[in-house]
Amino acid sequence: MDGAHRVVFAPVDNTARVHAVVRRLTDAIALGLLTDGEQLPSEADLAAHLGVSTVTLREALMALRQQGLIETRRGRGGGSFVRAPAREFDLDERLRSLSAEELRDLGDHYAAIAGAAARLAAARSLPADVRRLRRSLEEMAAAGPGAGMCRLDGRLHLEVAAASQSGRLTREEIRLQAEIGPLVWAVHDLPDRRGRVDAEHAGIVDAIEAADENRARDVAESHVLNAVERLIDRRLAF
């Protein structure tokens, strides 16, 4: 399972689980993290990945079928398959489900995790880790806006967390990407943000390669907080 799918299929919150599964998969399909025609894991496997019962999962899949986002085929070669929506991820619609206070709290949490992971990556990363990060930066520079950039954005942050050599931080990065990642990626992909975001990504990788722990932490924290401040401003404008 690649980084994008680890994020999509990370366990959901304990409350309102049907809604949480529906929102998680809806966001992933709208952002292109799950592609048109892609087959989802079996019900048993998907329920286990998401940390829900098969009954909860079936309710969520039924809601997604009603929205036309998946279709279920019977018989040999059957299963649940993604159907790409006619419209793209709607950032403003998604923001309406969160208050400014909730966004700030999520941002503070995510910034703390991202900063700690970057600091430890600067202290512990191996040359192979840095090469992976550089390769992701090159792919991001060549990518256009949309689903491909969202995948690469999330992958870069997972690679930073993995380079920290901390399993707990990596798992928390996966969990937080699943919760707030679609919002951060969407705001990163806005035309007036791309240049700044590219510079921030390069700054994180440069600091990790230079083993500059404090700078890696500071740039990673500000990178997340800058995006969250933009989200809060957009939310308050409603």
Image (cartoon, grey):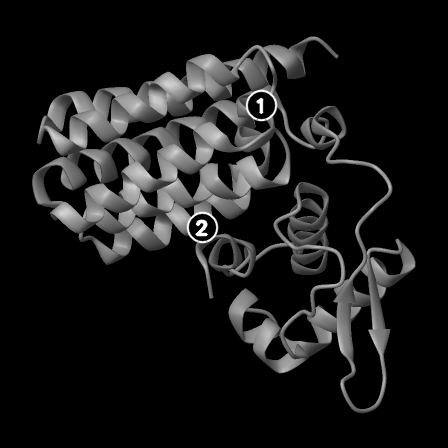
Residue 106, visible in the rendered structure: no
Left or right for 144, reference 176: right
Choose mark 2 or mark 1, whichever is in front.
1
- At numbered mark 2, what does the secondary structure look like: helix, strand or loop? helix
Rendering coords of residue 47 (x, y %): 60, 73
Q: Which residue is mark 1?
A: 187
At label 1, the amino acid type is: Val
Return the residue nearer the eye: 66 or 130: 130
**Farthest-out residue, front:** 142
Q: Which residue is mark 2?
A: 175
Rendering coords of residue 95 (x, y %): 68, 27
Q: CA distance from mark 2 to mark 1?
A: 19 Å
The residue positioned 67% from the left and 69% from the top of the image is 40
The residue positioned 46% from the left and 14% from the top of the image is 195
Rendering coords of residue 196 (x, y %): 43, 13
Residues at marks 2 and 1 touching, judged by CB atoms closer than 8 Å: no
Rendering coords of residue 217 (x, y %): 21, 27
- At numbered mark 1, what does the secondary structure look like: helix, strand or loop? helix
Near mark 1 (Cα within 10 A), the count class, few <14, some 14-19 or many ≥20, is many
Q: Residue 189 occupies which quadrant of the picture?
A: top right
Left or right for 143, reference 54: left
Residue 126's place in the image compared with 229, above or below, is: below
At label 2, the amino acid type is: Arg
Left or right for 129, reference 44: left
Left or right for 233, reference 167: right
Residue 95, visible in the rendered structure: yes
Near mark 2 (Cα within 10 A), the count class, few <14, some 14-19 or many ≥20, is many
Numbered circle sitting on residue 85: none
The residue positioned 61% from the left and 19% from the top of the image is 190
